[in-house]
Image (cartoon, grey):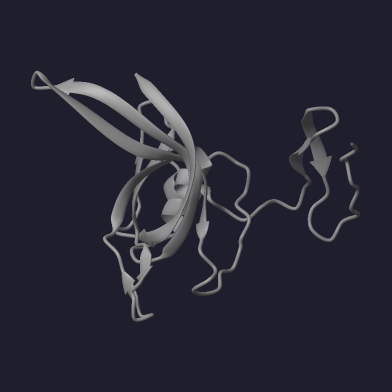
Amino acid sequence: MSTKIPINIAGNLVADPELTYGESGVAHAKLRVAVNQRIQGSDGSWQDGEPVFHNVSAFRALAENASNSLKKGDPVMVSGELEFRAFEKDGEKREARRIVAETIGPDLRWGTASYHRSPRAAAGPEAGIAGLQAAPEEAHPAYSITTKGPVSVPPLGGPVRNEISL
């Protein structure tokens, strides 16, 4: 049985993201995030509460980007679905929970970040980091809300058109 609940967390990475590739070539990053609650005492002073550790899984481009961008100790924000699973191991019933991430980003309350757009070319396990190359000078496909399909967007510096109509 599997239950999924929407969730947003802000915390710190406990370790560097672990990037692996499945048999089908899909990238999977495992992250461990510690979330500390701040508690105000009766005297007005603030203290850290007990940390709660969350296992986070990211897939495909999000997994590769998180692995290339984040490291142990970084403050992050994760949005996704909390997934509970029940399973049996050695004849004993057990439960596991993880967050399947939809988005991951740095928490900018504690510092600054520089954003670099990744090329849309897929980088498989054999390409590794070498698959992340500079974007070509030609137009990149994007998504149109009106046609619900790809559209051609000019590269940076080209004329801009808004394809969104409500």
Name the side, left or right, on which 49 lies relative to 147: left
Name the side, left or right, on which 118 lies relative to 58: right
Image quarter of residue 47: bottom left
The N terminus is located in which quarter?
top left
Residue 64 percent coordinates (x, y): 46, 47
Q: Residue at x 24, y 30 (%)?
A: 95
Name the side, left or right, on which 10 lies relative to 155: left
Q: Residue at x 35, y 59 (%)?
A: 13
Note whether 74 is above or below 105 in the view shown.
below
Image quarter of residue 34: bottom left
Asked whether 49 or 146 is in front, the reply is 49
- Count of numbered circles in the view: 0
Residue 99 percent coordinates (x, y): 40, 40
The C terminus is located in which quarter?
top right
Asked whether the viewer can see residue 59, the reply is no
Image quarter of residue 44: bottom left
Note whether 154 is above or below 84 in the view shown.
below
Q: Residue furthest left?
A: 90
Asked whether 16 or 165 is in front, the reply is 165
Asked whether the viewer can see residue 152, the reply is yes
Residue 85 percent coordinates (x, y): 31, 27
Residue 45 percent coordinates (x, y): 36, 80
